[in-house]
Image: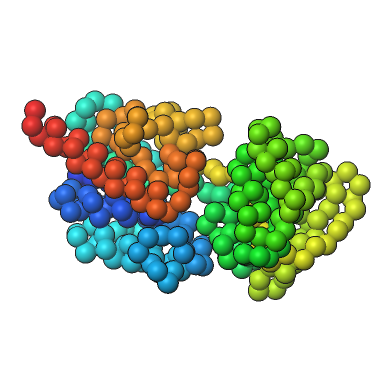
Amino acid sequence: MSEAIERIKTLIIGSGPAGYTAAIYAARADLKPVVYTGMEPGGQLTTTTEVDNFPGYPEGVDGPTMMVQLQQQAERFGTQVRIGMITEVRFNPEVGGIHTAVVDGKTTIEAETVIISTGATAKYLNIPSEQKLRGGGVSACAVCDGFFYKGQEVAIVGAGDTAAEEASYLANICSKVTMLVRKGEMRASKAMQHRVNSLDNIEVKYFTEVDEVLGDQVVEGLRMVNNQTGEKEEISITGLFIAIGHKPNTDIFKGQLDMDETGYLFTKGKSTKTNMPGVFACGDVQDKEYRQAVTAAGTGCMAALDAERYLAALESE
């Protein structure tokens, strides 16, 4: 006899600030949410040492502690948090239709509503020394971590609008910013290039790549290589920021949910509604502009409210 398929009201895929905030609101609305954590329980913040810009923590908090506290808050209201990866989804395009998800390739569950908070993964250079020093001076978010390098010399890798914007942000708080551009020109808009070039404490090095991040426990310097001449150069820095883009974690939704060319999910207007009824998206999976924990949490709240209203409308019909 086959095992009965579990039916739940609200399935939350992903466990970062967006997912846990959605769970808090959904649980308080008696939607009995079930969160599947994914491969990285707690999301990107679990790799962040200090979080100083999330409201309510006047002394700051380390990322892993903050995520444990968010999980505990969600569980206090009845959220079930399960370790597991949603590996397949089948969304029902009918209003009121039941959506199906597969956990770890074997267990099938059914959900009346689905909240997607799978986030986005920062792209890194994948150099061993860079990976070793993640959290020790290597960061993929200047806005998140730049404050810790106030008055110090740092470097940033990237050539697009985000890299130019983050270089400009760092230039306001750091004594010097060295910008490494792999090609002979930036991909950033002319306006952003002009902003970078107008700041005296930004030095742009073209045809330049990272050869090695120097330091044992923390970043102490950077060895760069000119990809045209092969010439190498070392500089002393305390922080290295990687700004070469993010990849939204949306592969399993392709072909079912509307997304842009890079995979970010589209949501309707100011809501978290996707093109599938009863399916909502929040956090970095649908936000490539801000990518902050506090904005992710805000959209997590919105997703839970959208799910609650969707179910309430069905019941009133």
| Residue 258 percent across, percent down from the top left | 42, 28
| Up/down of 279 relative to 130, above or below | above
- Image quadrant of residue 257? top left
| Up/down of 22 relative to 308, above or below | below
242 left or right, relative to 83: right
265 left or right, relative to 236: left
| Residue 109 percent across, percent down from the top left | 26, 45
Residue 5 in view of the camera: no
22 left or right, relative to 16: left
> Which residue is painted at 72% across and 58% down in the image?
176
Colour pattern:
rainbow
- Image quadrant of residue 72? bottom left
> Which residue is painted at 54% across and 34% down in the image?
262
- Image quadrant of residue 241? bottom right
> Which residue is painted at 77% across and 47% down in the image?
204
| Residue 293 percent across, percent down from the top left | 42, 54
Q: Nearer the viewer, residue 91 or 278?
A: 278
Q: Which of 144 and 14 is in front in this view?
A: 144
